[in-house]
Image (cartoon, coloured by chain):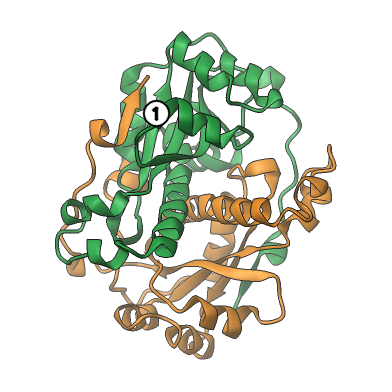
Chain colours: A green, B orange
Amino acid sequence: MLNNLTQDTLFNNARTHNAWTERPVTDAQLRHIYDLMKWGPTSANCAPARIVFVKSKQEKEKLVGCMSPGNATKTRAAPVTAIIAMDMAFYEKLPVLFPHADARSWFAGNQALIDATAFRNSSLQGGYFIVAARAAGLDCGPMSGFDADKINAEFFAGTTLTVNFVCSLGYGDPAQLFPRSPRLAFDEACRIA
Amino acid sequence: MLNNLTQDTLFNNARTHNAWTERPVTDAQLRHIYDLMKWGPTSANCAPARIVFVKSKQEKEKLVGCMSPGNATKTRAAPVTAIIAMDMAFYEKLPVLFPHADARSWFAGNQALIDATAFRNSSLQGGYFIVAARAAGLDCGPMSGFDADKINAEFFAGTTLTVNFVCSLGYGDPAQLFPRSPRLAFDEACRIA
């Protein structure tokens, strides 16, 4: 079992941040996040998540223009905001990622399975992304309030990628946190059968 | 930044297991997993994931009967197999989980938003679940090869719950691991803009 500091850093004391300090995030840290999260399991190793780390002022303003009004200011203020997307043609990589079977043929032509697999697994990878960013020492501010069509048009036109959610990265300002919201008790969310 | 042992335990050296030792998993460990993962962020704190930890022989056989042929034996062999489900009526809990706004009204009646929010966020929570189980010292064997209608009929009849994916928990037998499959390089999956 990992020590308490680890569990606190990843889960117990980790908070969603909306306000960010000036401390910058390096490209090496972004690579570190990916180099951790990439090992998280996905169905048939399909790994459909694709990430755009939006860091430059110009690209950030494009993204800010896609966010809902409540998310625009905090997106502008973050040192980096990642777009977690999914590649709807993920199965074209399966001959490399899952070489021991013809896994491509399980998906090609089955759009309902493609859609569910891309969404489930890129979201799972989004969970790994958030925990990996915290393991790398950063705070996260995930958001799903945005105009998805607009993000797709601005960042993914002419590709097979589509946005799943968006997550700011940086060093959050703890003074500007809201009180923590409650969680469901074990017996409300789980049972042992 | 967390130390290398932590990063290795959660990501770099963590493997999907298909074969399990006899070492049992306690109910306290299952509660520990939930008590970590529950803190992971979800949209409007909606926390749609619901978990059935299938542990008894009788319930496990019911679940085995719902798995695809390739997953039946390994599901039977695992000390516990968790069904990660989503509550499609998750928004009824928002007056408790997100008390500072009428978040229920954002969802009620908007089935497309309900469906996407339940699926995205219960999958995100599935990612937290897998990392939390590893932090708690267990190995994971996530699976999405099963008859979803059958699991829903066997475990969730008359409820608003529906299965998302399934994940065995226990102490994996490292001698029976396959060689690790490749991952996409940073530049294949990510860009910094």
Image check: B34 left or right of B1?
right
Quarter of the image with the N terminus of chain B in it: top left
- Name the quadrant containing residue B16: bottom left
Amino acid type, label 1: Val
Element under disc 1: strand
Q: Residue at x 78, y 50 (%)?
A: B94
Total number of numbered labels?
Answer: 1
Image check: A62 left or right of B94?
left
User: Residue A68: where, in percent of width, then height?
Assistant: 66, 28
Q: Residues within 10 Å of mark 1 (few under 14, many from 20)?
A: many
Name the one closer to the observer, B3 or B44. B44
Name the one closer to the observer, A30 or B140. A30
User: Residue A129: where, in percent of width, then height?
Assistant: 43, 39
Image check: B94 left or right of A121?
right
Q: Residue at x 37, y 74 (%)?
A: B23
Name the one closer to the observer, A30 or A146. A146
User: Residue B41: where, in percent of width, then height?
Assistant: 60, 42
* Residue pointed to by mark 1: A52
